[in-house]
Image (cartoon, grey):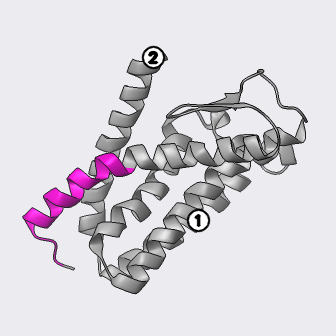
């Protein structure tokens, strides 16, 4: 697909609200699972935790940790279905950013602090197992969406730049408003 400059600017601007929505939806996955399991949860842009400081049951940590990556995959899959049905480029940032968000967090956010590392540790499987599985699923979704929309590597490189910018805005705003400076 040949993306003209006007469309590229619109897509770039779309990445910023997509980034905020993606973080909120990811954290909503943790929150809703924690709440369903009976824990009173505290919800923020980039972190969810039990209000009491611990879970009712030790297993709740595993299920609540799974909630974030699972919701990220669900969001990406939902927008892939929109792309499959309507072939709209405006759904692509939602698909692309999910993969980028998890990659960025795993590489630059301190791997041991991420959901995938925690899940792998709780399940006592290889340290990178869950991270690799989640990333491959999200990568395959992006690959399929790119194929359906005929988005080439050059355009995806532009999306990497915009995703980086958008991710830094989310992280910066979270740090600024929560008092958690990196």
Q: Give the label on residue 70, or none.
A: none
Q: Name the residue under label 2.
A: 181
Badge 1 density bin: few <14, some 14–19, many ≥20, Cα 10 Å: few
Relative to residue 125, is residue 89 drawn left or right?
Answer: left
Rendered residue at 49%/17% (across/down): 180
User: Residue 179: x and y, percent?
Assistant: 46, 14
Element marked by disc 2: loop
Give the camera-side residue of 43 and 119.
43
User: Residue 98: x and y, percent?
Assistant: 47, 56
Cα separation between marks 2 and 1: 31 Å
Residue 8 on the magenta segment: yes
Determine whether 139 is above or below 145 in the image.
above
Q: Mark 1 points at which residue?
A: 136
2 or 1: tag closer to the N-terminus: 1
Rendered residue at 63%/52% (across/down): 69
Element marked by disc 1: helix
CB within 8 Å, label 2 to label 1: no
Identify the magenta region. Answer: 2-18
**Which one is closest to the eye, mark 2 or mark 1?**
2
Badge 2 density bin: few <14, some 14–19, many ≥20, Cα 10 Å: few
């Amino acid at each position: 697909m040949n993306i003209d400059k006007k469309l590229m600017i619109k897509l770039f601007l779309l990445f910023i609200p997509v980034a905020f929505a993606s973080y909120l939806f990811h954290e909503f996955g943790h929150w809703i699972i924690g709440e369903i399991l009976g824990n009173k949860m505290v919800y923020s842009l980039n972190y969810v935790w039990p209000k009491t400081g611990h879970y009712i049951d030790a297993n709740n940590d595993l299920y609540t940790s799974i909630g974030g990556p699972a919701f990220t995959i669900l969001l990406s899959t939902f927008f892939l279905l929109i792309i499959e049905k309507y072939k709209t480029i405006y759904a692509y940032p939602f698909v692309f950013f999910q993969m980028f968000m998890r990659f960025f967090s795993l590489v630059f956010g301190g791997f041991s602090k991420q959901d995938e590392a925690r899940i792998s540790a709780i399940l006592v499987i290889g340290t990178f197992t869950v991270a690799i599985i989640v990333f491959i699923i999200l990568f395959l979704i992006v690959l399929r969406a790119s194929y359906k929309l005929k988005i080439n590597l050059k355009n995806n490189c532009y999306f990497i730049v915009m995703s980086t910018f958008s991710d830094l805005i989310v992280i910066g705003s979270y740090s600024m408003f929560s008092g958690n400076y990196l």
